[in-house]
Amino acid sequence: MNRLADFPRKKILVSPSLLAADFGCLESQITQVAAAGAEMLHLDVMDGALVPNISFGAPVIKALRKKSSLYFDVHLMIEHPLRYARMFREAGADLETFHIECADDIDAVIAAVHALGADVGISLKPATPAEAIFPYLDKIDLVLVMTVEPGFGGQSFMADQLPKVTAFRREIARRKLDVRIQVAGGVDGKTVGACAAAGAEIMVAGTAVFRHPQGMVAAVSSLKAARSALDADLH
Ligand code: DX5
């Protein structure tokens, strides 16, 4: 599956964040995480400008593309996504999620990513209100609510961001839009239930997957256990 529309709705999907993986053996890590039941791979691209860290770029994604058929969920924490949209698509991105706080024209980035044949998402930092993205909801495929300050893995979950997930769920339902809600940052077996209950369907988890004491299979299934909350038709 290489489009979001190919994935079922109202089912917890897991997109492990590669940032928490062992960078010394990425191929085996992504093979293991796919075997553990992850549907996607979350690729955190950081430029040291939009966020205070630098991670990896298109060459790494291009190398991993040859090794995996997972849906590549690329999170562009960069100032100028418009400048790099083609580069990441050609490297193998299936989804390009950029930040509402970036320096580029939002509509231009949405149009560019769609013109390249990829899905497009918008993400927001904790200080940014959900309403900042409302004007674009009818043009995008996904919204990513950060539940940490973006830039690093392994941080504590910010429960005060969950009302934003609910606000998106309500606005999407009110306008009868088809937009997926994703959360990232401190998502684990303990916090995933609240994320699903608020309306998130795609769970990004780095530490909770790649560094789970019982391994990746246990980690992925603990995240999918939240499905019961979701199936309670909270949407
Ligand atoms: C943070 C990244 C997240 C993070 C998630 O800037 O966007 O994807 O890596 O990692 P954990 O699950 O360890 O918080």
Image: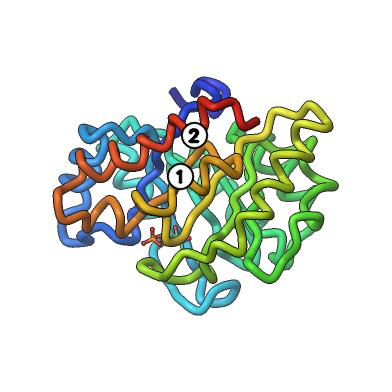
Give the SS element for disc 1. helix
Q: Position of residue 69 (x, y in %)?
A: 33, 30
Q: Is residue 5 above or below residue 126?
A: above
Q: Does residue 34 appear to the left or right of 214 in the view shown? A: right
For the C terminus, the image quarter is top right
Residue 193 has which mark? 1
Q: Position of residue 101 (x, y in %)?
A: 71, 66
Near mark 2 (Cα within 10 A), the count class, few <14, some 14-19 or many ≥20, is some
Residue 11 has which mark? none
Q: Position of residue 49 (x, y in %)?
A: 57, 76
Please report whichever mark, 2 or 1, sits nearer to the chain's N-terminal start: 1
Q: Is residue 75 above or below residue 6?
A: below
Residue plotted at (34% across, 56% down)? 206
Q: Does residue 73 appear to the left or right of 174 in the view shown? A: left
Place residue 71 in its image quadrant.
top left
Q: Does residue 229 appear to the left or right of 108 in the view shown? A: left
Residue plotted at (55% across, 41% down)? 197
| Nearer to the camera, 225 or 132 | 225
Q: Is residue 39 above or below residue 7?
A: below
Count of all numbered marks drawn on residues in the image: 2
Give the SS element for disc 2. helix
For the N terminus, the image quarter is top left
Residue type indicated by callout 1 = Gly
Residue plotted at (61% across, 61% down)? 161
Place residue 176 in its image quadrant.
top right
> Which residue was labeled with disc 2?
229
